[in-house]
Amino acid sequence: MQFDVTKADLSTAISTRCEEMDQRHGRRIRSQNVKTRAALAEAGVDVLGLSVGADLPWLCGYEAMPLERLTMLVVPVDGDAELVVPALEASRVTERPSIFGVRPWGETEDPCALVAERIPDGATVSISNQTWSQFLLRLQNIVPSASFEPASRVVGPLRARKDDAEIESLARASAAVDRIAKRLQNGEIALIGRRERDVASEMARQIREEGHQRVNFTIVASGPNAASPHHDAGDRVIQPDEVVLCDWGGTMNDEHGVGYCSDITRCVFTGTIPDEFNALYDVLFTAQAAGVAAAQIGATCASVDAATRSVITEGGYGDYFIHRTGHGIGVEAHEDPYIVEGNETPISVGHAFSVEPGIYVPGRFGARLEDIVVATAAGPRSLNMADHSLVSVTA
Ligand code: ZN
Ligand code: ZN
């Protein structure tokens, strides 16, 4: 057998290998890019401009630093995308799969002028919702003939429908917070005699230890504080014989460094549960299960809200359910689709959202039960599997 490998063959082989790697790592990013271009064309948008916020990492894996220097990915509906980025941050970009060009700007350049050069006269421009107003105002000033709109109109529905890899990322993050729920319910996280804020810190530490890169929130609301849905964990010392409502979540990176969120709520009771509270929790439990069951393909977001709300209303607690049933979740903790009355968006395959009804009796107590649910052709799939019952803990 004779080996006749030239240097040229080797270099071809190596570059093919590099392309394969690039393709594997960048496959999803490329597919997001293709989907986005198609959606821009359909919506009649000429240019998409993405700055700080979650749209940019969702599309390309790169997250803009939320500082006073402008970072903006400019995506024309047909043509090459280019990332206008501060020169001192350009090296953060270069290891990314190359689906766009990079235009670093120096300290004395005007980055808005660079973006404006890429906006044709009279163009419709979609700008990511969290872009700082100082940049948008300046762009409007430089290109007065362009009309600007929030990017959520085009990008929101795309981000709302998760592909298989994104669902797996959400499932991994959900499994991580489920393990913390288990420790809360079996008494491994001590409650009685501790301040809410100390329990919240412990939960935050566990969120990181369970593989999240970021802690988004840790609500620990005890006794009457549980009647405040977004209570800030404070100095109140947790007492025996009361409810403790815990709602926690974080962001866990996938293999491309794009973060996906977790979000779960469980309540425990520090003692023997009184009949009155058991009755309330039974209604909540039934309402949450009804909401999950209603999350069928083709049903509207509003109908999922109605499913939880009708159980709570029939149970006599209608006036105490003071928020929508849920929110979409993905690269952001709250995103489309919102599970709220009036949202007639039909649920479709890949929609991921929370189902989290709550009952809040001011001055007395409250309870909420929350899972993340993904809509699939085979029916709703709950990503959180931690015990849904009201567990009594004695620690
Ligand atoms: Zn939550
Ligand atoms: Zn939530």
Image (cartoon, rainbow, N blue to C red):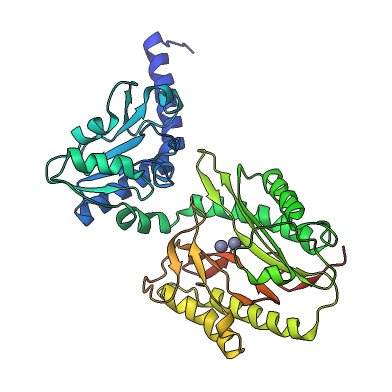
Residue 355 sits in quarter: bottom right
Residue 253 sits in quarter: top right
- In the depicted view, which residue is nearer to us: 8 or 382? 382
Report how many numbered discs are placed on residues in the image.
Answer: 0
Residue 282 sits in quarter: bottom right
Q: Residue at x 62, y 68 (%)?
A: 228
Vertical position of residue 309 compared to residue 9: above or below: below
Horizontal and vertical percent position of residue 202: 75, 50
Side of 2 where 270 appears, left or right: right
Horizontal and vertical percent position of residue 377: 46, 68
- Outermost residue, right direction? 394
Horizontal and vertical percent position of residue 226: 68, 69
Q: Residue at x 43, y 42 (%)?
A: 57
**Whereabouts is ligand 1, in terms of quadrant?**
bottom right
Horizontal and vertical percent position of residue 25: 46, 36
Q: Quadrant of the C terminus?
A: bottom right
- In the depicted view, which residue is nearer to us: 8 or 268? 268
Vertical position of residue 394 compared to residue 218: above or below: below
Vertical position of residue 209 compared to residue 220: above or below: above
